[in-house]
């Protein structure tokens, strides 16, 4: 029974005051954050504009410098100009030479922005000046004359004061040469110095700003001792070019930061000491640094309007918030009583629903007081304990269950009452129908005493026992199978796409077939076990998702084994694989196919190459018969000689065919050896040919332990060395290099020479049986075919590398089955 004591309809204003304070604080915080973001945006935009201007100006300055160097280089490289200068500076100047040079140089003054061009002789004296107006000597130019006359490249003389007014000028210089005593060498006769006025192009270029601004400008500076020297006229201070110097120790100065190595956006002060934003870039191939700057006050000027606008908005928000909160507070006062009454009704309904849930739930619910009496028992608990709720309510536990004090449940209940700690107990009993039942009781301390929640787990225990028995039968079956069995579960990403799968079970045959220990595989993902991407992820994902059966026979590269795999889905999201190792069968089938194809090639080559000498013998026997009938003994002897040569070639062909047929069929017992031992035997067998040709042999790389038919392995190296000597050509310093690279079964052996080489279009024929690229070369063309057969017998491959004729040849081969 719920009693309403009365409703306090008086509402306090404090929550509304706090709400107004929160709104005010939030508005101010939002305005502050927006103002800061707006300010940062302005700064970023200003820096971006400065970056674009700085990069543009640097490119323009670099282009201007290259044009100045190009102008003077064109003049200096003109042989006609050099000859005119030589004539004008000669002891007896050629008539008209000086006038021609003056006219020539005069063409460069106005169009190209030069104000003075001077030619100095080899002793540093001014000989020709255009225009010919007197001017005091420039110390910078005279100090650099020695460097100019020694350098074969144009020299850039940095900005310097010139003339009586000490105005900024910039010069480019280069030496002038003329024909010397010998036609192959030219002598230095003079130095050409072309001076330009930076006020005509360079300074205006730097001064121009692409948009309206009151404080933006571009500075050109360089280091001058411990000071920063400003090279151009400044916008906000006059007469500064080559005159304004500020100490480098002023680290806040943008120009000082540029000389100290700063590149990109910077902040600091300018030559007036005002805070500015800037962007600094060095001018390539020069001591100059370009600084694009703007006053921070100008860049942030829009923030003044923004502050006023934000203040107006915040004020309006606070006024509206105050009005809204006042209306809510007034309405809340009227609704307080109604809400209180609604809460009472809701509490009553909730209590009824709670009681209904307790009475209809499958789990037992018991409330036991501190005096060990049942306070409340729901229907499920009464049914589980074989009593009625009415019989148990208000009774002592020991009255309803006399033998309970000897059980674990009693000990758990009393422990929970005394220690006030949760307990769990399991009890076997009989329900109201007398059937065995297993109850798990979770006991929690509550203010009234203890709360016991009892769960009937009889069905779950029976199912668990059945599953355990089934799993035991499955494990016994799979662990004694010859085929590998593995159970996997799919792993999906956040988008539901399969990205990997985990091995949850594998039988002993799995370890035997794959060579992977069970403790290494079970519980880990496929990418961890096999390395790289999970094998056949898409196919297995389809099996796990659709239940579609999948069966295939594949070659698994990480293990270098062939497997026949069959997969099925035990339950959604999982798949099981049954596989067996069929590597031996596949290898036998492949070997049979290779042998069949090789036999076809062998039969074709043998029939083709044996037919040629046989035809020769038959032909010359016919000629012999005719010559004997004619009594021509001399020609008859020649016929016999040709027939003998053909028969000898046929004998050699048959011997080589016999050697080829024995590879893989007649095999000596495998003997442990090393690659260097094989090489030494091969070099001993070819020592005569190597010595006769004067070939230097170098054996490089670490030694490799081998096991195989030593005579066959020697044949491989011997034939490759013979081939290198045979086709060394007219190489003055013949050389052969033999070595090995890599480790284990991946070791690659090579024989490299610097001989005649092989054209790429012929490289596919070198291993053909009796296929000779040079028909006049000694031998019958079976050596490399024999090498290929031996290498393939040891599961290896052989390739040839050559860039073309007279570039040398390199044969590379592997012997995986012979590696120890």
Image: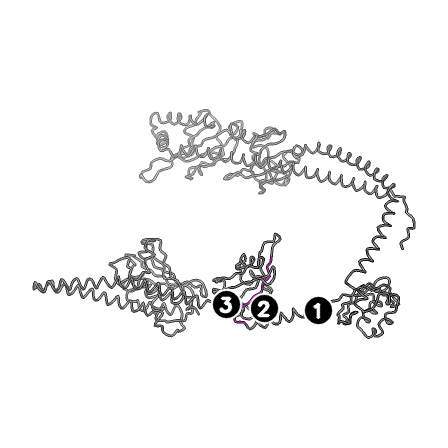
Q: Report which residue position mark 3 lands on.
A: 580
Q: Residue furthest front?
A: 433
* Quarter holding residue 328: top right
Tell whether position 415 is magenta. Answer: no
Tell me the SS state at disc 2. Answer: helix
Q: Is residue 694 visible?
A: no
The correct choice, above or below, for 214 with respect to 401 in the image is above
Q: Determine whether, in the image, residue 67 is placed left or right of residue 20.
A: left
Instruction: Give the label, 1 or 2, closer to the camera.
Output: 1
Residue 567: x and y in percent read 54, 63
Distance (Cα) linking label 1 and label 3 = 37 Å
Give the camera-side residue of 415 and 762. 415
User: Which mark is first along the chain, 2 or 3?
Assistant: 2
Residue 335, how many percent across, how many down? 86, 42
* Label 1 Cα neighbours within 10 Å, binned few <14 / some 14-19 / many ≥20: few
Tell me the quarter of the picture where residue 357 sits: bottom right
Q: Quadrant of residue 238?
A: top right
The residue positioned 82% from the left and 37% from the top of the image is 322
Residue pointed to by mark 2: 519
The local crowd at label 3, few if under 14, some if 14 to 19, many if 20 or more residues have their Cα within 10 Å, is some
- Residue that protrudes farthest toward the left in the picture: 631
* Residue 276 percent across, percent down from the top left: 64, 36
Task: Tell us which disc is closer to us: 3 or 2.
Answer: 3
> Please, what secondary structure does the residue beneath circle 3 have?
strand
Q: Are marks 3 and 2 in contact (CB under 8 Å)?
A: no
Residue 242 image offset from top left, x and y in percent: 56, 32
Alpha carbons under labels 3 and 2: distance apart: 20 Å
Residue carrying label 1: 461
Q: Is residue 122 above or below residue 582?
A: above
């Amino acid at each position: 029974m719920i009693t309403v004591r009365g409703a306090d309809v008086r509402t306090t204003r404090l929550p509304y005051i706090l709400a107004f304070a929160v709104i005010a604080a939030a508005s101010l915080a939002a305005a502050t954050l927006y103002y800061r973001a707006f300010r940062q945006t302005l700064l970023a935009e200003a820096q971006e504009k400065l970056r674009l201007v700085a990069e543009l100006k640097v490119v323009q300055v670099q282009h201007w410098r290259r044009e100045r160097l190009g102008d003077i280089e064109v003049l200096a490289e003109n042989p006609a100009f050099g000859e005119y200068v030589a004539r004008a500076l000669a002891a007896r100047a050629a008539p008209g030479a000086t006038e021609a040079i003056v006219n020539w140089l005069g063409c460069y003054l106005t169009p190209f922005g030069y104000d003075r061009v001077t030619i100095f002789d080899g002793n540093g004296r001014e000989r020709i000046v255009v225009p010919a107006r007197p001017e005091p000597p420039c110390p910078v130019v005279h100090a650099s004359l020695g460097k100019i006359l020694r350098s074969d490249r144009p020299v850039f003389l940095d900005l310097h004061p010139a003339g009586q007014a000490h105005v900024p000028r910039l010069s480019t210089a280069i030496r002038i040469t003329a024909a010397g005593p010998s036609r192959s060498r030219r002598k230095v006769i003079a130095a050409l110095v072309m001076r330009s006025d930076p006020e005509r192009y360079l300074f205006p270029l730097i001064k121009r700003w692409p948009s309206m601004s009151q404080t933006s400008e571009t500075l050109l500076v360089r280091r001058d001792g411990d000071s920063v020297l400003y090279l151009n006229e400044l916008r906000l201070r006059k007469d500064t070019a080559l005159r304004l110097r500020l100490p480098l120790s002023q680290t806040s100065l943008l120009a000082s930061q540029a000389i100290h190595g700063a590149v990109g956006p910077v902040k600091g002060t300018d030559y007036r000491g005002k805070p500015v934003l800037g962007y600094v870039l060095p001018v390539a191939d020069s001591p100059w640094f370009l600084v694009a700057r703007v006053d921070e006050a100008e860049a942030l000027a829009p923030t003044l309007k923004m502050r006023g606008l934000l203040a107006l908005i915040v004020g309006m928000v606070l006024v509206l918030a105050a009005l809204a909160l006042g209306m809510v507070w007034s309405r809340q006062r009227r609704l307080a009583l109604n809400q209180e009454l609604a809460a009472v009704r809701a509490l009553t309904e909730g209590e009824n629903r709670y009681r209904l849930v307790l009475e209809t739930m499958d789990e037992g619910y018991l409330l036991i007081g501190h005096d060990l009496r049942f306070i409340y028992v729901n229907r499920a608990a009464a049914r589980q304990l074989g009593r009625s709720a009415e019989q148990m309510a208000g009774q002592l536990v020991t009255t309803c269950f006399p033998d309970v004090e000897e059980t674990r449940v009693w000990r758990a209940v009393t422990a929970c009452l005394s220690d006030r700690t949760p307990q769990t107990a399991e009890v076997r009993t009989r329900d109201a129908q007398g059937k065995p039942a297993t109850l798990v009781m979770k006991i929690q301390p509550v203010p009234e005493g203890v709360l016991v929640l009892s769960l009937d787990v009889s069905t779950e225990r029976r199912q668990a026992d059945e599953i355990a028995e089934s799993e035991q039968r499955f494990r016994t079956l799979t662990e004694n199978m010859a085929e590998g069995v593995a159970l996997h579960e799919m792993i999906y990403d956040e988008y539901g796409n399969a990205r990997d799968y985990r091995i949850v079970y594998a039988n002993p045959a799995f370890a035997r077939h794959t060579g992977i220990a069970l403790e290494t595989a079970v519980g880990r993902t496929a990418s961890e076990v096999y390395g790289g991407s999970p094998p056949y992820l898409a196919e297995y994902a389809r099996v796990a998702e659709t239940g579609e059966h999948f069966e295939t026979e594949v070659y698994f590269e990480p293990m270098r084994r062939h497997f026949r795999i069959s997969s099925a889905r035990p339950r959604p999201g999982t798949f099981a694989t049954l596989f067996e190792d069929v590597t031996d069968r596949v290898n036998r089938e492949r070997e049979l196919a290779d042998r069949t194809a090789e036999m076809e090639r062998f039969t074709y080559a043998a029939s083709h190459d044996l037919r040629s000498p046989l035809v020769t013998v038959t032909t010359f026997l016919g000629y012999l018969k005719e010559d004997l009938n004619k009594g021509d003994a001399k020609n008859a002897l020649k016929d016999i000689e040709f027939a003998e040569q053909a028969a000898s070639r046929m004998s050699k062909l048959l011997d080589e065919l016999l050697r080829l047929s024995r590879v893989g069929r007649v095999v000596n017992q495998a003997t442990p050896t090393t690659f260097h031992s094989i090489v030494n035997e091969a070099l001993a067998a070819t020592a005569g040919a190597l010595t006769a040709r004067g070939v230097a042999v170098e054996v490089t790389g670490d030694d490799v332990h081998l096991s195989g038919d030593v005579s066959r392995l020697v044949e491989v190296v011997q034939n490759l060395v013979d081939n290198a000597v045979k086709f060394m050509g007219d190489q003055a310093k013949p050389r052969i290099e033999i070595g090995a690279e890599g480790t284990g079964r991946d070791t690659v052996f090579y024989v490299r020479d610097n001989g005649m080489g092989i054209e790429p279009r012929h490289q596919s024929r070198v291993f053909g049986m009796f296929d000779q690229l040079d028909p006049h070369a000694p031998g019958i063309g079976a050596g490399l075919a024999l090498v290929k057969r031996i290498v393939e017998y040891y599961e290896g491959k052989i390739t040839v590398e050559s860039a073309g004729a007279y570039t040398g040849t390199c044969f590379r081969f592997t012997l995986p089955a012979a590696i120890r």
